[in-house]
Image (cartoon, rainbow, N blue to C red):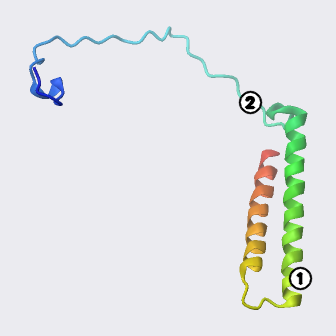
Amino acid sequence: MSGYGEPEWLSGQNENKAVTTEDANTGGNLTAPPAETSSGVGKGGLALMALSVLGMGLAGMMIALAVLTIIEINKAGVGDDLSEPFLAAYMIMFSLLLFFYELMWWT
């Protein structure tokens, strides 16, 4: 028997037991599932299409807001506070990523 905290397989006392294995019964009739269509309707219906269009619209509005923010900062001058231009640039990058993600759903 193994000592405290020591697994039994470490001691080697079970070396003369016969090892048994079984083959899995797969039935021999495995088939691949049917291929999905690439049309937008097959990907979730009208609700998902509407949510995707809404997401693209929101991404476009976020880009417009960020561009307007950069224009206003340019008119007023940046000064020492760089948080607003950084946030506007970050919003543009995030919105572009979201817009292209939603656009890829339609392909």
Callout 1–callout 2 Cβ contact below 8 Å: no
Identify the amino acid type marked 1. Answer: Glu
Where residue 74 sits: x, y (%)? 85, 87
Identify the amino acid type marked 2. Answer: Glu
Q: Residues within 10 Å of mark 1 (few under 14, many from 20)?
A: few
Where residue 4 sits: x, y (%)? 14, 28
**Residue 10 quadrant:** top left
Write down the residue under mark 1.
Answer: 72
Q: Residue at position x 84%, y 59% from top?
A: 59
Quarter holding the N terminus? top left
Between residue 61 and residue 49, name the one nearer to us: 61
Task: Determine which of the numbered discs, if any, sits on residue 58 in the image.
Answer: none
Q: Residue at position x 89%, y 69% from top?
A: 64
Q: Residue at position x 82%, y 33% from top?
A: 44
> How many labels, in total?
2
Q: Residues within 10 Å of mark 2 (few under 14, many from 20)?
A: few
Question: Could you give the CA–CA distance between mark 1 and mark 2, rounded to whole angstroms?
Answer: 48 Å
State the SS at label 2. Answer: loop
State the SS at label 1. Answer: helix
Instruction: Please give left or right for residue 69 compared with residue 87 in the image.
Output: right
**Residue 46 quadrant:** top right
Write down the residue under mark 2.
Answer: 36
**Residue 37 quadrant:** top right
Where residue 45 sits: x, y (%)? 87, 32
Q: Is residue 75 above or below residue 44?
A: below
Where residue 96 sits: x, y (%)? 78, 63
Q: Is residue 17 above or below residue 90?
A: above
Q: Earlier in the sequence, mark 1 or mark 2?
A: 2
